[in-house]
Image (tube, grey):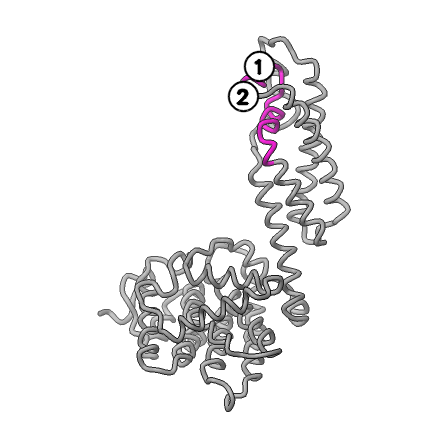
Amino acid sequence: MDDVAGGGGVSGVDFSDEEKVVAWLEEQSVEVRCAIASRATLRVSANICRVEGEDFPRIALPVFRALLTSAAYGSGLSADLEWLQSTSVSVCAAARSAASLIDVQNASSAIPFTILSAGLAALSVGDTTAGAAADSITHSTRSVTHGKGNTTILSAATKDTEQQTFASFEFPLWQGVEVPSSIALNHQDFLDLLDQNRATWGFWHDWYLAMWEGRFTDWDLAIEVAKIPDDVWEQGAEAVASEIDKKWARQAVRSALNNLPRTDTLNAADRHGIGGNAPPEALEDVAQLASQTTLIWAGVEALEKEAYAEKPNKTRILAAIALLQSGAGACVKWLGRKMDLTIDELIKWGVPTGAAHLLLNQPKIQALIHAAIKWSGLL
């Protein structure tokens, strides 16, 4: 086997040889290093479920933050990641501090090795060498104390290098490799522990499980979570959970906005005017309907500005919701009197094209209103 694969990952790397691992990592991008390091640590991060009492949140939160930071950079799905390089050192320091809480004399050595592995995975974001990523993989291996488990973890890391892409995280952490029994037990206990308090740990439960199974896709939200300021992280898991709820709600509004129909004729009138060149008999209330759909689009535009603002304004969000509710209410009443119409039929009757699209997409408007109400309630 070729011990050092090229950037395309066409062959495996012998992770039992640290010198060759470092040599291979030095040829890779920072994104690849982070993906490899974060995946290696995620395989063993459930070890921290053995931490008891008040120490658990003080340890779990820095570990999750470090892993999310490294994985977010490793995803390679956003160009807005330069800030991670400046924060990676502080994220790693937080993980190291968490490791210092563990009394090695009274706890399994697997726990501090796991925490340090997470911290080093984050440090590899800003490290100019491959050393941090290699050390992260080494520590994750040491977190399994028996030989078969060590070999299995090395095999899983080798399979990572055989993939055609590292950045997408679209394959399970243990793909093609049997999970060591101790890790499998900790994995389930870890999920159960997090699930007991979803108000605080729900996001982390779902993120960890999705990463384990190779199905996490919401990197926009993950990156927003990684951007939470240091002072919030320092307040603890509950404060971070509150901030995550706000970010999740804002992402829901953005998704609802993206789901709305967008064409070049979404404003009040069709490009040929009502009815085009051969107007049919116009509906008596078409003009009023057009004014109501104008209210909807005014609300959409106002809400869109706030959804992407650095500091959203709750008052303006509530005003946008009022516009949406007013316009949508009138449209729903109008539709109740004229059921089963198609876009073409609406336009033929004199309804402007943009208004016609809105009329037949009321469920999407309602979804936007509900998402915006929930978001405003968290601000």
Residue at (62% x, 62% y) in the render: 199
Residue at (54% x, 60% y) in the render: 81
Q: Dot 2 lies on which element?
A: loop
- Mark 2 crowd level (few <14, some 14–19, many ≥20, 10 Å Cα): few
Which residue is more in the foreground, 167 or 206?
Answer: 206
Residue at (50% x, 91% y) in the render: 105
- Mark 1 crowd level (few <14, some 14–19, many ≥20, 10 Å Cα): some
Q: What stretch is highlighted in magenta?
A: 345-364
Percent across and percent down for residue 27 are 36, 68
Q: Which amino acid does label 2 sit on?
A: Thr
Q: Is residue 76 above or below residue 104?
A: above
Residue behind mark 2: 342
- Apparent side of residue 13 relative to residue 73 in the rendered image (left or right): left
Residue at (59% x, 34% y) in the render: 363
In the current view of this chain or complex, which residue is farthest to the right?
315
| Quarter in which the C terminus is drawn | bottom right
Residue behind mark 1: 348
**CB under 8 Å between discs 1 and 2:** no
- Apparent side of residue 262 relative to residue 17 in the rendered image (left or right): right
Q: In this view, does 35 lie above or below 101?
A: above
**In magenta stretch: residue 349:** yes
Q: Which amino acid does label 1 sit on?
A: Lys
Q: Dot 1 lies on which element?
A: helix
Q: Residue 62 carries which label?
A: none
Percent across and percent down for residue 156 are 34, 69
Nearer-N-terminus badge (1/2): 2
**In magenta stretch: residue 232:** no
Q: In this view, does 121 lie above or below 218?
A: below
